[in-house]
Image (cartoon, grey):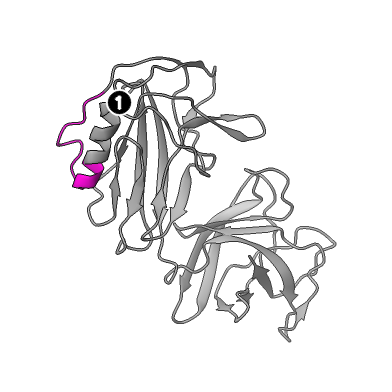
Amino acid sequence: MNKNVVAVASVASFLFVAGEFVGCEPTVVDDEQDAGNDDANDAGADDAGDGGACVPTSLDIGEQTLSLGLLGFIDIAPGQVFTPTVGYEECCPAFQPLPDACVEFSFSRDATGMATLDVATGVVRIDENAPDNTSLGLIASVDDGAHMARLTLNIFDPAQNPFVGTWHQTATLECGTGAEVDPGRAIEDVSFFGNRRFHVTHTVFELLWVDYSGAVSFDVERGTFSFATSRGAGSLPEDVDGDDGTFELDADGRLILRDLWLGTFSDDMVEGCGVVLER
């Protein structure tokens, strides 16, 4: 079992049981639990155990919930490595790492051909040939299962999904001519994720606030792009148009969406028939 949860920049979840941490006994990982992990991972878990029993944790976080970050998921590409942090959400929001605890990690399903896991440290290594648009659940068992935290790993291939990341609007495409014009009060956040979902926030003022979200559909070879929406915490403009559009990633790395409209959020926005986004 590991004594320390390594802190990294991570995102979170809100699904788990809160309470007071009062310690635990170390857990032995048997061969069935560790199936799918390579010998190096097994050795890492054994080495962690050589230092003695994990340090009991005594921390009262009241009604807070344990998590592995602030959004409940991360986007990760083949060949990348991720080290999770167990913690909990504080006000406004912020993520507070949990001090030393008895933690054991596992996947929610068989990860053969997708990823390997060090059950003691939680280090995940995504396979170089992991398929695009797949997901794995990472589970952290705290204090011998007394508390649980989970995180979804959205695996994406940047060649097959080049949109993943956070963008902002820099221009509007004029209807008819397609000319780039000043957008006025531009959209500040258009984020695409590895599970082919997205969200739009006109004015960013809080980490977890979004105006609307939805799912994207695209064909990289044909250059087609469309999206469907669902309302978030804020506004879903009436003139959103996600049907039958196209995309271009130009030489400067800009994302140009044509015959699509992310919505007119205010009178000081310039309406159009497409948008130009930059990272």
- Asked whether residue 111 appears in the rendered view, the answer is yes
Residue 225's place in the image compared with 154, above or below, is below
Give the position of the N terminus as an image quadrant.
Answer: top left
The residue lying furthest to the left in this view is 31
Query: To which quarter of the image does residue 45 belong?
Result: top left
Q: What's drawn in magenta, residue-wise?
A: 27-42
From the viewer's perspective, tell me whether residue 248 is left or right of residue 220: right
From the viewer's perspective, tell me whether residue 4 is left or right of residue 26: right
Q: Position of residue 108 (x, y in %)?
A: 30, 41
The residue lying furthest to the right in this view is 268
Residue 29 on the magenta segment: yes
15 vs 50, nearest the viewer: 50
How would you rate the neighbour count of disc 1 (Cα within 10 Å): few for under 14, some for 14-19, many for 20 or more? Answer: few
Label 1: element kind: loop
Q: Main secondary structure of the magenta part?
A: loop
Name which residue lies at 76% across and 63% down. 186
Q: Which amino acid, by three-letter code, is at mark 1?
A: Gly
Name which residue lies at 34% across and 22% down. 54
Q: Position of residue 219 (x, y in %)?
A: 45, 75
- Asked whether residue 36 appears in the rendered view, the answer is no
Name which residue lies at 22% across and 40% down. 42
Residue 194's place in the image compared with 14, above or below, is below
Q: Position of residue 220 (x, y in %)?
A: 46, 76
The residue lying furthest to the bottom in this view is 177
From the viewer's perspective, tell me whether residue 157 is left or right of residue 39: right
Query: To which quarter of the image does residue 144 belong?
Result: top left
